Amino acid sequence: MSDQSFIREVDEAVRQERYKALWDRYGLYVVGLAVALIVSVAAYNIWTYVKGSQAEAAGDEFVNALTFANANDQSKATETFESLAKDGPSGYRVLSQFQLASSQAKAGETDKAVAAYEALAKDRGVDPILKGLATLQAATLRLDKADYAEMQKRLDGLANGKSAWRFSARELLGLSAFQSKDFKSAEAQFSALLGDPATPPNMRDRANMMLALIVSGTGTDSKSQTN
């Protein structure tokens, strides 16, 4: 091996380690940011959805349940949310179901939370924007265990359409493909994010980071196989 080839190998290895370190440090944070984006984009729509309901009593119950949850009185919060989810007006029924699913996820009851989000995503009475949110939440909870084929089944409908959720769906698909070492599919998903002029800046930055990691990793793998 020539000195120049050796230097190139070292340079590629250093770049791979640098991006791997970034992923190891920020990978879970990226997933958290994806969820944060989902919640922030949905906030106004959820508020509008609730505001349309004139059921003041149900609104008071919902606020009380949130107060219990914030005070770490989860048993009272769950009891109130369950009551609203069963008998409340449609808007509060749906939002209570979201709260119950979120509580299950936080408690480590992932399978129950996924099932709850899936039920919301399939409910014809749920507003489309909230159905998309439920789909993303279920997929996010499955990210560490699901293979890429499952994630495609869950998210392709959002990723390939004009939904406001397409950005988060593509990012989750890209992360899933990356975890599965399907670098070609991961590159396609992150490239799609860069190719969409409406992609949020922070998500565009993460897509660039992941593409750099993919190119560095696959380039080094290819070089190793050649040698």
Image: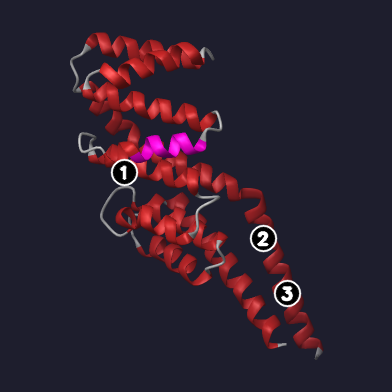
Inspect this view and state whether residue 7 appears. Answer: yes
Q: 16 or 137, which lies in front?
A: 137
Q: 36 or 137, which lies in front?
A: 137
The numbered dot on residue 157 is: none
Residue 65 placement (x, y as % from top left) = 40, 14
Quarter of the rendering containing residue 173 = bottom left
The numbered dot on residue 11 is: 3
Please say whether residue 100 is one of the residues in the magenta stretch. Answer: no
Q: 5 or 172, which lies in front?
A: 172
Residue 51 placement (x, y as % from top left) = 23, 21
Residue 200 placement (x, y as % from top left) = 40, 50
Is 208 located above or below residue 84 in the figure?
A: below
Is 82 located above or below residue 140 in the figure?
A: above
Amino acid type at image mark 1: Gly
Report the residue marked by disc 1. 132
Q: Please indicate whether residue 195 sits to the left or right of residue 124 in the image.
A: right
Label 1 – label 3 distance at C-alpha? 43 Å
Is 75 located above or below residue 224 in the figure?
A: above
Inspect this view and state whether residue 199 appears. Answer: no
Q: Please indicate whether residue 2 sits to the left or right of residue 174 in the image.
A: right
Q: In the displayed image of the protein, which residue is found farthest to the bottom?
A: 2
Name the residue rendered at 51%, 57% in the picture: 175
Amino acid type at image mark 2: Lys
Label 2 – label 1 distance at C-alpha? 31 Å
Q: Secondary structure at mark 1?
A: helix
First in residue order: circle 3 vs circle 2: 3
Magenta segment boundaries in residue numbering: 110-118
Report the residue marked by disc 2. 20
Name the residue rendered at 37%, 54% in the picture: 155
